[in-house]
Image: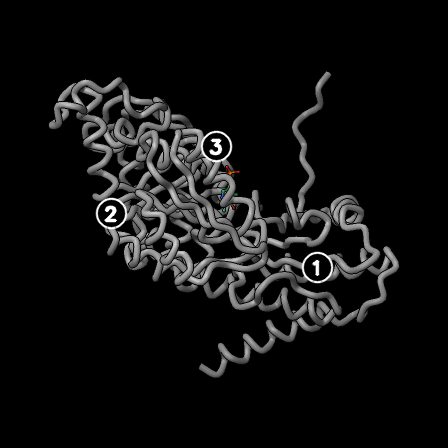
Amino acid sequence: MYRDLSTSLRTIMTPGPVEAEPRVLRALSTPILGQFDPEFTNMMNETMEMLRKLFQTNNYWAFPIDGTSRAGIEAVLCSIIEPGDRVLVPIYGRFGHLLTEIAERYDAEVVTMETEWGEVFQPHDVIEEIKKVKPKIVAMVHGETSTGRMQPLKEIGEACRDMDVLFVVDAVASIGGTDVKVDEWKIDACIGGTQKCLSVPSGMAPITFNSRIESILLERKKIERGLADREEDKKRRRPVIRSNYFDLSQLMDYWSPIRLNHHTEATSMLYALREGLRIVLEEGLEERFLRHQLHEKALIKGIKAMGLELFGNAKYKLPVVTCITIPEGIDGEAVLSMLLEDFDIEIASSFGPLKGKIWRIGTMGFSCRKKNILHVLGALEAVLIRHGLKLHAGRAVQAALDVYDNEKCAVETI
Ligand SMILES: *Cc1c(COP(=O)(O)O)cnc(C)c1O
């Protein structure tokens, strides 16, 4: 017979999925409501309201796509790309390749530019490329989980707006952990994730988009209904958006007071997202970002005190992912296995050119707390000693404790 469901209580310090907020897990066991029950549609409206705050936007449209984070990316791209549209994707890690692949699947003419993993783009270089390529869309990652870097977006967003280019941003890893200012950075469509800094299980992708995107969607819907303004559009093959599930123009009708049936909303996941957002807003965005910075600092001081080196350009570090160079002669995978088996701690390796070269420690959402930082530093030190590495034993946890003590002094003197 199959045994009862019984999972180990792991300390999850990866870039996702991370430990879920206990309140979110309780919300998941709330009884089901029908999707048109006023109690439920009221929760849909509240979720939209809270998402606007999370994305720091006045956009009307802010709602979750059911599916993992890439469902949000695919929904945005497939709804605005027409075959042959030029899309510029600046790639500085694995998730830039995901944007490229999705855009290509919808027959965009994708132009890429790449920079070394561990670096980001100078906004000037991207803007020059936009002038040369003249794309309809620029699609970019904000927090690149695979390399632990964060791309400054404001200048690029402003340039896109000036040149009437649509700016689509994957903020899956950064949303809820560090500032994502959709309106201020002139982002036209932004995609977040649940299983990272929101500490809600994987399965939904919150998105937001503005009236520039909306007007494209409304135009495409008119074509679908044979109501296009232009003669050549009237003759077009319909439907023009090649996904039913991800058709944002249909999803708009479902997430507006029209409540036109599309899919069956994922009831329990909506409860979970709503609770996760409530927790974020109760903590306060500013306070939450400061908390992520504090624990990042304790972790970094600890890693360095141990004698390990951080990977990547420090100036552009993503605050919620810390990459460590695997020391010479150490088997990275063996260290991960021992951390998991003996200490119940999960940290991550990386992909592509960084495979076998770095470890990545996530400090996201509910996982980002003192107990976890001290636990992971102590365990990593012990495991590395076990693997024969000569390091500054005993210093890592002390260095992190110093950060926490100093922080206490700072708070007490205010
Ligand atoms: C995790 C992640 C994704 C993909 O998320 P899934 O939930 O696995 O689909 C996309 N982009 C970035 C930057 C991510 O960190």
Which residue is the site of mark 2? 59
Q: Identity of the amino acid at label 3?
A: Ser
Place of residue 133 in the rendered image (x, y in percent of width and height, measured from the top left): 36, 48
> Residue at left 34%, top 29%?
83
Q: Quick check: 207 above or below 33?
A: below
* Mark 2 Cβ and ligand 1 under 8 Å apart: no
Q: Are marks 3 and 2 in contact (CB under 8 Å)?
A: no
User: What separation in Å lies between label 1 and label 2 (alpha carbons)?
Assistant: 41 Å
- Spot the residue most to the bottom: 413
Q: Identify the image quadrant of residue 94.
A: top right
Q: Is residue 376 left or right of residue 184?
A: right
Position of the C terminus by quadrant: bottom left
The residue under label 3 is: 29
Number of other residues with Cα within 10 Å of mark 1, as a class: few under 14, some 14 to 19, many 20 or more: some
Give the quadrant of residue 376. bottom right
Residue 205 position within the rendered picture, expressed as x and y whole percent measured from the top left = 42, 38
For image coordinates 28% across by 23% down, the residue present is 240
Which x, y percent locates residue 5?
65, 28
Q: Amino acid at mark 1?
A: Thr
Q: Quadrant of the N terminus?
A: top right
